[in-house]
Image (tube, rainbow, N blue to C red):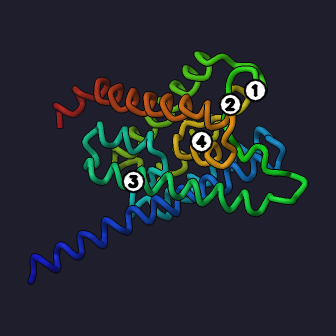
Amino acid sequence: MIRRNKIKIERRIEMKKYVAEFIGTFVLVFFGTGIAVVSNGNLVATALAFGLAIIAEAYVIGNISGCHVNPAVSLAMLISGKMKREDFAYYVIAQILGALLGTGILFLILSGTSFGTTSLGANYFGEISSNNISLVGALVTEIVLTCVFVYTIIGVTSDDKYSSVSGIVIGLTLTFVHLIGIPLTGTSVNPARSLAPAIFLMGDAIKQVWVFIVAPLIGGALAAYLYEYLNIEKKKKH
């Protein structure tokens, strides 16, 4: 009986983590890409939208799920040994579903308005992008930006002395990542955030979305391995 109750409690805790990731990714995608659309791609407004969303969520769901809201972040945590494989799979599913809900509601709201539903915050490269960035350029941009962002997350969440300001640091990092990334690729650094609008728009968006899935995952993995390499001596001392 005691063991059975313990299992039920553990399952309830696990489910709360997945729900938190679902809600968190929904909020990030709805407000982030939503503000990108209604502000006509305003650089500062969009960057702040993503950054502020992460800051708010970090202090609301951070103690529940860690506030990954991003498959690239979850992959880095898996590589770093900070989460189980089963959790990783469910986190990614929850994140994708949350992103789809965020884009779906945004699509519903924008349908019939002057803003239209031809963008939804999708990412592009090549001739259909705003600056004709090459495939290689898009891949490198997303890998570098994601690596910087995820490395920051691992760094500030690996030391308890930063716990009170970690959400702010992570949110501000996502903001400055967007400030340079938006003019280049529209900034993904999050496979779930890019996949959702691509699914709704289809066409060129779905054909090119692989770049904005693969590159952030590579960047997240690089961040995990880089942090491990740079801090291996520090770990040995402890």
Report crowding for label 1: few under 14, some 14 to 19, many 20 or more residues within 10 A (C-alpha).
few
Give the residue number, with chain letter if any, for mark 4: 194
Q: Amino acid at mark 1?
A: Ile
The residue at 62%/58% (across/down) is 102
The residue at 34%/44% (across/down) is 159
157 and 220: which is toward the camera: 220
Residue 91 is tagged as: 3
Q: Marks 1 and 3, how far apart in space?
A: 32 Å
Q: Helix, strand or loop at disc 2?
A: loop
Q: Marks 2 and 4, how far apart in space?
A: 10 Å
Query: Earlier along the polypeptide chain: callout 4 or callout 1?
Result: 1
Front label number (4 vs 1): 1
Q: Helix, strand or loop at disc 3?
A: helix
Give the residue number, with chain letter if any, for mark 2: 124
Q: Helix, strand or loop at disc 1?
A: helix
Q: Is residue 148 visible?
A: no
Q: Amino acid at mark 2?
A: Tyr
Q: Amino acid at mark 4?
A: Ser
Give the residue number, with chain letter if any, for mark 1: 128
In the image, residue 218 sits, relative to residue 102, either above or below, namely above
Whole-percent x, y for residue 146 in the image: 51, 32
The N terminus, quarter of image: bottom left
